Every structure is written in structure tokens, then in C-alpha cells.
Amino acid sequence: MIGERTLTLLGARAIAVTREVGGIALMTGQVLRALLPPRLDGRELVRNLHRMGNRSLPIVALTAFFAGGLMVVQSAPFVKRLGATSLAGWAAGYAVLREIGPILIGLMFSGRVGANNTAELGTMTVTEQLDGLRALAIDPIRYLIVPRVLAMLIMLTALTIIGDLVALVGAAVVAYLVLDIDWRTMYFSFADNLTPHDFFHGVYKSVAFGAAIALTSCYFGVTVKGGAVGVGRAVNAAVVAAAVSIMLLDFFITYATA
Amino acid sequence: MTARAFVEFIGVEKAFAGKPVLRGMDLAIGKGEILYIIGTSGVGKSVTIKHLVGFLPIDRGEIWFDGQRVDQLDERGFYPVRRRVGMVFQNATLFDAMTLTENVALPLRKHQGLGWKAALADARRRLAQVYLADFADRYPAELSDGMRKRAAIARTLTLAPEVVLFDEPTTGLDPVNARRIDRLIRELSRTLGVTAVVVSHDLPSIMSVADRVAFLYQGRVHALATPAALAASADPIVQQFIAGRSSGPMETPGF
């Protein structure tokens, strides 16, 4: 039987989660309101696009290359056994475009960019830099948060598209090296079996994942309390929340479009 | 109808977690005046100035600025007030990721409609006015506390505020840098007619710069006088604070 203490703890945790979800929803509303009319700080947007996107490209490309290769390695025993070389590209491409690409790149992006964003905003919060902005009659949502949210949305989508292409190259390279499947066979396996819908299915997901990472990382950053320890806790909470959001969104988007 | 002071606090009350800090504080500040707010730690000095710019909501009472009641404004409503009432924080709150020039250029770009290059040029000129021309391209982390505070003052002045709130501007500074900050505050008031409200514990600053001093005690203004009159006060509580005696009639929570 569940004791009173356990129920109390469960209730407190449920209230805390509800408060956080409510806070993120409120921030989403503030971001949308700040976009009407869209008076963006172009310099801040470009700065964030560069540091969030360009600097993430090498690690995303490396991860995507091996993710594509991994799909081929996993399917290699079946391809060999059944002699279905013409389907090796389809199997790897389907998994990469629809699931592995968006999820892996989303998690990578969350760990690198989202965590960094929470730590930076958290440090600005505890050192009163956000109040410094407010004291200068500059809205932190409009100046700091909106450019970051847009930069993350744009760059995660772009990185996912690039990552998808690199993953297909990775799959072709590994197929050639491990299964001795020539480039031409892999190309036609991709071209004949994969549809634009497979590609866009992953792109939709990356937009949703980008929004989730951006909003959670910004929310936990600006609500930090308790100095350096609080910043550490916020980064942890933001990464966990983003990972959970990615998995939930992935399930529901896949379910809704199945 | 009686004319209101430029800045006025009427019966302001504020409590944190049920613990009262301000208990019906009344304070009127004249235009162009340099008013110092003094008192023991935790008495509500910083809380008072944060109320004026809407960083903390009051529990009860009224706050007026230039004939406008401001305590009921929401965050957006406070932005026009903050363009007229600048604040220099105790920790300067310069943006880490920007050089001093970029820090000062930001409000110029946002509020004066300057392009980036023009804002940077104007920012350099303003930094030179606070003797930081040689450090304009440095980041805040590379500078001393005194330099950061001077840069923060330059940044606040870009808004051409009518009131500047200083939260412990000389705390943590050596005497030379502290007197430089004092001189800046005095020049602001005398040359630009800016009203300065300064939270401080620094007695040399208070005695040499203030027009009047408000001594907060138990959540209210216990004494309001010129520095000389305050120093000469026969009030035993004021005397204990001015003399810095640990024993006396003053009740200090936590001791």
C-alpha cells in the first residue's frame, strides 16, 4: 500500500512538473507575442546562428556519417543471408531519414547547444545581467530569447538536413567496404525506395525538436535560482527535459502521421 | 491639490516569506537632489530602489515618479519609466560576452536609433568621459571592479535618465576609485541636473556627496537630514550607526 509520505512526494513532484510545463508554455506565449510585430535584433540572430549552427556542423557530420554506416552494419547479416543488396540502401535510408537522423542530431544538439544556452542564460540570471537589460529598458525576451529560439529552430532543421545527406554517404561508404555493394546499387536503392515524404517526415520532427530544445533550455536558464549550484541544476534539468520532449514528440508525430 | 515630489514613496510595505522589510516607508525626493539611503544590512535599502524601477512589486502603499503612479504598472508599463530612471547595480551587470564599447553601444543602438558603427563611435566617446578610453575593447572580466562600475555608469547614462539609482557604487573599491565614483555622481547632478539616489554604507562618500541622507531603520525612514545635521544628531540610534558601534540601542536582526 502506498504510504502517505510517498503520496506527498508524488504530489509534490507532479506540482513541480506542472509548474515547469506551465512556465515553458508561458514563455512560448511571450516569444510568440514578441514576434508580433517581428522586430528582430538581426545582429543577435546572426551571432546565434553562427555559434549554434556553424560550430555544431563538424560534430553533427561525424555523428551522422557513423549513424548511417551503423544502419548498414546492423542490416549486413540479413542482407548477406537473403542476398537483398538492392534493399540495403532503403533500410539504412528509411531509418536514418525518419528516426535516427532527427533523434540523434536532436540529442547531440541538445547536449551541445541547449546545455550551453541554459548555462549562459543561467549565469546571466544569477549575475543580474538580465536585470541589467531590463534596467536599460530592453526586453530580455525580445532581445535574448527570441533570437536564440529562432536560431535553434533554423539550425537544428538545417543540421538535420545536412546530417541526413552525410548519413546516406556514410551508409554507402560502409556498404561498399563491409558488404562490397557498389555505389551505383546503393544510389538506386536510395532513389527507387525512399520518397520525399520520408525526408520531410524527419524535417518536421527536427522543427519540433528544435522548438522543444530552444524553449526548455531558455526557460531553465532564465529561471535559475541559487548561484552556481543552481546553474548546474538548471543545465541538468534542461538536458533531461529536452531528451524527454524529443522522445515524446517523436512518438506522437510518428503516431499521428503513420 | 498638493504638488508631489519628483519621486515619492508613500506608506510602502514589503515582506519576504512573511518577514517584513519595509513597514510603511515614506520618502520624498526632489528633482536634481543627491539623496543617500543608509542603514544596516537587510533593512530594505536596495529593495527600496528596486521598487522604483519595478524589479520588485510592493505589497502595499504607493510609489510616484514625476506625477505618475508607477507601483501598479506591469513589466511593459515600466519600460518607459526605466528609460527615465536608470540603475547602476552593485555588481555592474555588464554583459560578459561584450566588450565595454559593445556594452555601452547596445542601449544607444536600441533607444537612440543609431546604427552599429555610429553607436560604437558614440560609446567610445562616452567611455572616454569616464576615463576608460584605453580599455574600450576589453571584456568586463579583464577589468577591475572600479572600471566595471564606471563603464556601467557610462552605459546607464546613454539613456539620458532624469534619475539614476546607484546600489552601493563604492562597495569593494579602494578609496581612490571610490572617490572617482563620488566625483562622477556629483558631476552628474551638478552638470546634468540628474537626480541621484544612492544606497551606500560608505561614510566618506555620504558626507562629501549627499544633499540629504535618509536613514532607514526597522522598515521606515528613521531620520532624514543633511549629512552635517545627521552627523550632529542626538538620536542615539543614528549616533550608534554613524559611529559604527556594535553595542547600543539599535536592534539588528540576526545578532
Image (cartoon, coloured by chain):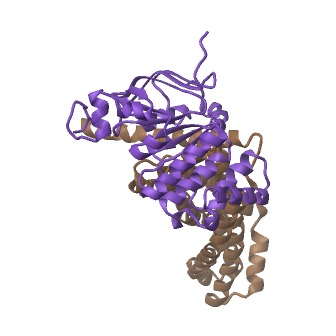
Chain colours: A brown, B purple
- Please tell me which residue is depicted at 63% across the width and 21% down the height of the picture: B67
- Expressed as whole percent of the image width and height from the top left, the position of residue B117 reads 78, 60
The furthest residue to the top? B1
- Expressed as whole percent of the image width and height from the top left, the position of residue B121 reads 75, 60
Q: Is residue B131 above or below residue A163?
A: above
Which residue is at the front of the view, A9 or B195?
A: B195
- Tell me, yes or no, if residue A145 can be seen here: yes
- Please tell me which residue is depicted at 75% across the width and 40% down the height of the picture: A36
- Tell me, yes or no, if residue A2 can be seen here: no
- Expressed as whole percent of the image width and height from the top left, the position of residue B235 reads 30, 27
- Please tell me which residue is depicted at 65% across the width and 52% down the height of the picture: A149
Q: Quadrant of the N terminus of chain A?
A: top left
Q: Is residue B132 above or below residue B156?
A: below
Q: Is residue A12 above or below residue A237?
A: above
The furthest residue to the left? B247
Which residue is at the front of the view, A77 or A227?
A: A227
Image mark count: 0
- Expressed as whole percent of the image width and height from the top left, the position of residue A40 reads 74, 49
Which residue is at the front of the view, A74 or A165?
A: A165
Q: Is residue B118 above or below residue B203?
A: below
In the rendered structure, the answer to whether residue A201 lies left or right of residue B169 reads: right
